[in-house]
Amino acid sequence: MSDWLDEVPWNDVGLVAAVAQDAASGRVLTVAWMNREALQQTAETKQAVYWSRSRNRLWRKGEESGHVQKVLELRLDCDADAVVLRVEQAGGIACHTGRESCFYRKLENGRWVTTDPVLKDPSLIYRK
Amino acid sequence: MSDWLDEVPWNDVGLVAAVAQDAASGRVLTVAWMNREALQQTAETKQAVYWSRSRNRLWRKGEESGHVQKVLELRLDCDADAVVLRVEQAGGIACHTGRESCFYRKLENGRWVTTDPVLKDPSLIYRK
């Protein structure tokens, strides 16, 4: 049964916007994209799987960093062009820069100001 | 000064995804789109202005319903393809269906289930 996937009006390149929000703090961690397969796998595995537009392939969030997103809840909006995931963020780090959230810049007096600390050096996260 | 607008890599149709989140509850209310002018007006007026893809024009959120979003904070993500707005939602209703949030459907056992009540009849919100 995947009728629920048919209710998503995939955009002209087959994607839907996906907002991941920390289930505990409510903080928006990441905004990424899912295709049909990514959304299906996310629902089945209860771990966030996105479509990487830069790499042009499925992207299991945390596959390199270990910073997986355990999905507690999936929601769809009224016009069905976005989903919200309530997640538990492994390591407390969602961003490839080593920060809690990708939204670490805030508009202040006409400038994007970095307000959030790097919690872990990315070179330690992504060493091979 | 609008250098900060140049830091947004507007997509191929000149838009960026915009997530509005209730500043008090943390609930994700809406996901919509902004073009450069919408983001600039949002920052200047401290009220959410989007680009309506269906109407192909600027959309001052609440212009018909009165359900404006007062913007307390604007954040940009690491690859700058999405912004998050922390807002105060007038009337406590963000969705055109009369619900608090547009994300009123939850995936349960392979179905999108409506979990949130209609707080106000849309016909009372949008009467002319």
Image (tube, coloured by chain):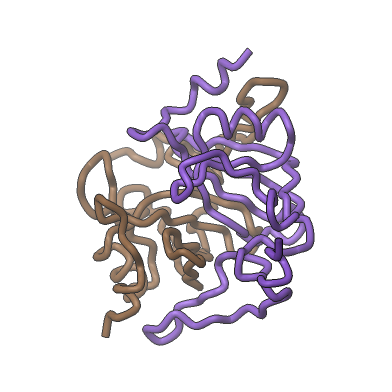
Chain colours: A brown, B purple
Q: Position of residue B31 (x, y in %)?
A: 53, 53
Quadrant that contains the C terminus of chain A: top left
Residue found farthest to the front: B128
Q: Quadrant of residue B44?
A: top right
Q: Is residue B59 left or right of residue B86?
A: left
Q: Residue at x 29, y 62 (%)?
A: A38
Nearer to the camera, B28 or A42: B28
Decide: is B94 above or below B110. above
Q: Position of residue A10 (x, y in %)?
A: 31, 60
Q: Position of residue B38 (x, y in %)?
A: 58, 34
Q: Position of residue B85 (x, y in %)?
A: 64, 44
Q: Residue at x 75, y 41 (%)?
A: B72
Q: Residue at x 36, y 54 (%)?
A: A61
Q: Residue at x 35, y 73 (%)?
A: A7
* Total tally of numbered discs in the picture: 0
Q: Is residue B56 left or right of residue B27?
A: left
Q: Is residue A66 left or right of residue A28?
A: left
Decide: is B4 above or below B77. above
Q: Quadrant of residue B58?
A: top right
Residue found farthest to the top: B1
Quadrant that contains the N terminus of chain A: bottom left
